[in-house]
Image: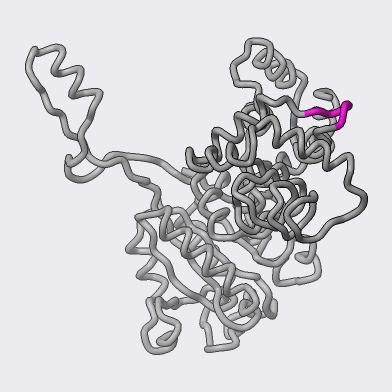
C-alpha cells in the first residue's frame, strides 16, 4: 500500500523520492507517532510535502489511496482498529458528549451496531434515526445531526462527526490555481528580509537569561521588534481591460499591505508614463510625476507591476500613443527608466499564461521586462518573488 501511495504522489506531481519513503517507514518502525489515521496523515505530509502549494494535491492523493480504509470498516478486509476510533472520540468529544454516548450504550456496542446495520441495510436511506443514511438523527451517516455520530462519506452540515474522513484542509492551496488573499500572503512571504529596527521595546528572553546567569542578578535585556525590512513599490494597472481582474487585484493589494510595512503604491493605465496617481477619482487632477517617484525612493526598493499588458502596441512604442493624454515619451522609455532605477523588478499578469502569445502588446512588455513577467497564480507569484530575492 505504501509503495502505491508513493506512486500516486508522483503521478500527482508531488516530487516524492524513495529516500523520503524510507524515512516514513523508519518513522513508523520507531513508533514516533500514535497509530491513528490523523497522526499518520500529518507524518506523511511532513515527510513528502515541501511546498505549501502542493498541500491540496497531497490531501486528494491521501483520500484516494486510503479511502477504502476509511469507509469500509466493519468488513473483514478493511477493518478500522477500535483504538483508532476511540482516539478520535477522545479528541473530538467533550466529557458531556462521551457521557451521552454511554447513555446509548458502550462505545463497543455502538461500533458493533454500526457493523450490523451495514450488513442488514439494503439500498440508500434518507432521514430517520436508525439506518445508515443521510439527513437524519442516526449516529451513522452524513448530513444529519447526532452528537456522537460517525460520518460516512458526504459532507457534514453540523461539523459534529467524530471523524471527517474526506476532509481537505488545504483546498485552496494549489499552485495551479488563481490566487485568493490567503494564498497571496503565503506566496509573498518568500520576499522577506527581517531586521530589528526602531525602539527596544521587546523582551529578549535568551539574552536576559544569559545575562542573569553570568552576573548573578536579574539583567533585563530589551531589543527592537523584528520586522520585514523589504521595501516594495507596487504599480497597479486600472480601468479598461483590467476591469475583470479588479477582485484579484484587490486581494493582491490587501495581502501586500499586510505583509510589507514599507510599501508604496501607485496606479497607472495600460502602461506607465510620466505621471501616476494614488486616487483613481483624482487621476487627472492629482498626479505624481514619475521623476518624483524615481528620485524619492531608493534603488533598494523592489518594483512590481500588476497589469494585463493588453493595449495597442503604439501605447508602448510611440510618443502620443496613450489613449488618455499626449505622452511626449513612449511607455517603453519610461519602463526602461524604471527597471534601470530598480533592478529588482517583475510584471505580474492576471491573464492566463497560455493566452499571452495572442497579444502583441504582451509580448512587447514581456521583452521590455527581459522575460520577468509571471502569471498571477500561486506558482507564478512564487517564481516572481524568487526573482526579486535574486536581485540586490
Identify the main secondary structure in magenta: helix
Q: Residue furthest right?
A: 122
Instruction: Look at 67% across and 60% down and name the residue there.
Output: 178
Q: Residue at x 81, y 36 (%)?
A: 115
- Viewer can see residue 61: no
Magenta-drawn segment: 75-79
Q: How many marks?
A: 0
Q: Quadrant of residue 27?
A: top right
Q: Is residue 370 magenta?
A: no
Does 58 sit left or right of 267 as displayed? right
Q: Nearer the viewer, residue 326 or 380?
A: 380
> Residue 148's image quarter?
top right
Front in this rendered view, residue 268 or 298: 268
Q: Is residue 259 above or below residue 210?
A: below
Q: State left or right for residue 258 relative to residue 181.
A: left
Instruction: Name the one closer to the observer, 363 or 382.
Output: 382
Q: Which picture quadrant has residue 36? A: top right
* Farthest residue, direction left: 217
Residue 307 seen: yes
Amino acid at each position: 500500500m505504501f509503495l502505491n501511495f508513493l506512486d500516486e504522489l508522483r503521478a500527482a506531481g508531488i516530487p516524492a523520492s524513495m529516500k523520503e519513503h524510507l524515512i516514513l517507514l523508519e518513522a513508523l518502525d520507531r513508533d514516533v507517532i500514535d497509530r491513528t489515521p490523523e497522526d499518520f496523515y500529518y507524518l506523511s505530509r511532513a515527510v513528502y510535502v515541501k511546498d505549501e502549494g502542493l498541500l491540496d494535491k497531497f490531501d486528494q492523493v491521501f483520500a484516494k489511496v486510503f479511502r477504502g480504509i476509511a469507509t469500509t470498516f466493519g468488513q473483514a478486509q478493511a477493518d478500522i482498529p477500535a483504538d483508532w476510533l476511540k482516539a478520535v472520540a477522545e479528541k473530538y468529544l467533550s466529557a458531556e458528549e462521551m457521557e451521552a454516548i454511554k447513555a446509548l450504550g458502550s462505545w463497543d456496542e455502538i461500533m458493533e451496531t454500526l457493523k450490523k446495520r451495514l450488513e442488514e441495510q439494503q439500498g440508500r436511506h434518507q432521514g430517520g434515526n436508525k439506518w445508515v443514511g443521510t439527513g437524519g438523527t442516526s449516529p451513522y451517516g452524513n448530513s444529519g445531526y447526532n452528537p456522537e455520530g460517525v460520518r460516512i462519506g458526504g459532507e457534514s452540515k453540523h461539523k459534529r462527526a467524530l471523524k471527517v474522513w474526506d476532509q481537505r484542509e488545504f483546498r485552496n492551496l494549489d499552485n495551479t490555481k488563481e490566487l485568493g488573499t490567503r494564498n497571496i500572503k503565503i506566496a509573498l512571504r518568500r520576499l522577506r528580509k527581517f531586521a530589528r529596527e526602531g525602539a527596544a521595546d521587546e523582551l529578549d528572553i535568551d539574552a536576559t537569561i544569559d545575562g542573569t546567569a553570568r552576573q548573578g542578578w536579574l539583567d533585563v535585556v530589551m531589543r527592537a521588534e523584528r520586522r520585514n525590512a523589504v521595501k516594495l513599490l507596487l504599480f497597479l494597472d486600472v480601468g479598461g481591460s483590467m476591469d475583470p481582474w479588479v477582485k484579484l487585484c484587490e486581494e493582491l493589494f490587501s495581502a501586500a499591505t499586510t505583509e510589507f510595512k514599507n510599501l508604496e503604491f501607485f496606479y497607472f493605465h495600460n502602461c506607465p508614463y510620466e505621471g501616476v496617481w494614488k486616487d483613481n477619482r483624482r487621476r487627472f487632477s492629482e498626479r505624481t510625476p514619475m521623476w518624483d517617484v524615481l528620485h524619492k525612493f531608493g534603488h533598494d526598493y523592489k518594483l512590481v507591476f500588476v497589469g494585463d499588458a493588453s493595449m495597442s502596441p503604439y501605447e508602448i512604442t510611440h510618443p502620443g500613443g496613450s489613449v488618455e493624454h499626449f505622452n511626449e515619451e513612449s511607455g517603453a522609455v519610461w519602463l526602461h527608466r524604471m527597471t534601470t532605477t530598480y533592478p529588482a523588478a517583475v510584471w505580474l499578469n492576471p491573464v492566463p499564461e497560455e493566452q499571452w502569445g495572442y497579444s502583441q502588446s504582451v509580448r512587447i512588455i514581456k521583452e521590455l521586462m527581459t522575460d520577468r513577467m509571471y502569471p498571477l497564480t500561486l506558482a507564478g507569484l512564487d517564481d516572481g518573488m524568487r526573482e526579486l530575492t535574486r536581485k540586490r
